[in-house]
Amino acid sequence: MSEEEAKDLEAVPEDTGEERTGPKAGGLLAWFVRAGVAGVLLWLIFRQPELRTQVMALLRDGKWSWVGLGLVCSGLGIVCNILRWRLFLAIMDVRVGRRRLGSIFLVGSFFNLLLPGVIGGEAFTVIYLMRDNPGKRGRILMSIAADHLSGFFALLFAAAVFATARAEAFLSTPTTASVFIFMWIVVACGALTFLMTLIGTYLTAIGRVPKRIPFREKFIWLGEIWRIFLSDWRRSLLGCGISFCILLLHYTAFFCAGRAFGVPAGVRDVFSAMPAVDVATMVPVSLSGLGVREVLMKQILDVLAGVPAEQAVLLSLTGFGFTVIWSLSGAAILPFLKRGQTNHDGN
């Protein structure tokens, strides 16, 4: 990265990632509301005695080797997440060792699980990386944004290839049709925004966006990400390739959860359901999508593969449980994580 580009990065508007020592009152209220929504949805699902009995029977007869395989797939996805983020940090000339970054990532995932809003974990990672790399706050934030952008490309691919292939089934009921249409509205709006900023960056016009345009600073921010992508396109493409691997491992983990409890759904069914479910659970109405994910899985897998409610719910909870287990490992790492170090080698 050139010296001129580095100066530009530090000048990019930074309205996220402020150093926060704890959640604000509004954030705590939002956290409790989301937790309440998740609790109510799960209560509505499990209030039927027949379903509870069937779930317990499935747990007794479960094939736990498949659960172990799903946990491994989820863990490999986390390893790929860390590698992808380290790649984008390297593009931004931010140096951090593999072990150090892995520890920060897992602790950040733990805070994402517990703190109000996703910013909890991301604020933690920014603060710790800034202590290792003083004066590089803008580059660290940019690496996180680029990391998310590459993940969006993978999601766009999954929606176009997996979910759209089952469009007829999705559109067969009002509920699944609404989820399918909502998925494409979100994906299409995101793709259009990124395309506009890409064209603006290519034409070097992104910095001349009139001040009266809404979200002007966001457009400039996205333009800077595209500029980095284009200036180091080989490593950026590698990052996007890693994103596809992450997504496939994520879907495979849920498929393994289904196999553990005899879910009559194939790879195609699970992979078709996951993009729509993932997009819907991005809406912060419940804690980590808990409850919403189970309701949607029950509806979608019934339409796609005739999966009984108890099996769909158990698949969803087990798949989410893999993420919880790996995130909780961050709690064990936190007491041993140094507040700052300058180890920039591979350790």
Image: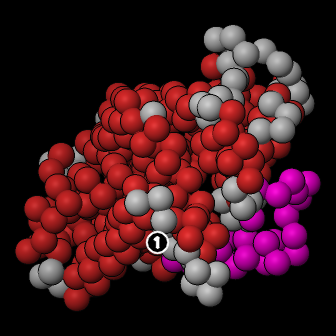
Q: Above or below — where is 331 with respect to 41?
A: above
SS label for mark 1 = helix
In which quadrant will I find the C terminus?
top right
From the top left corner, tell me how far across and down residue 88 is, in percent: 55, 35
Residue 246 in sight from this viewpoint: no
In the image, 67: left or right of 145? Answer: left
User: Which of 160 and 114 lies nearest the eye of the viewer?
Assistant: 160
* Residue at position x 59%, y 60% in the image: 221
Q: Quadrant of residue 60?
A: top left
Q: Position of residue 150 (x, y in %)?
A: 43, 47
Q: From where the camera sits, is residue 207 visible? A: yes
Q: Quadrant of the N terminus?
A: top right
Q: Which residues are magenta?
A: 15-43
Left or right: residue 281 compared with residue 95: left
Residue at 89%, 30% (x, y): give it.
339
Structural crowding at the residue carrying mark 1, measured as other residues with C-alpha within 10 Å and reported as few (<14), some (14–19) or many (≥20): many
Residue at image point 73% right, 16% down? 344
Q: Is residue 86 magenta?
A: no
Instruction: Specify the amino acid type for callout 1.
Output: Val
Q: Which residue is painted at 39% across and 36% down in the image?
A: 233
Q: Disc 1 designates what residue? A: 292
In depth, the one of 126 and 177 nearer the eye is 126
Q: Position of residue 36 (x, y in %)?
A: 66, 77
Number of numbered discs: 1
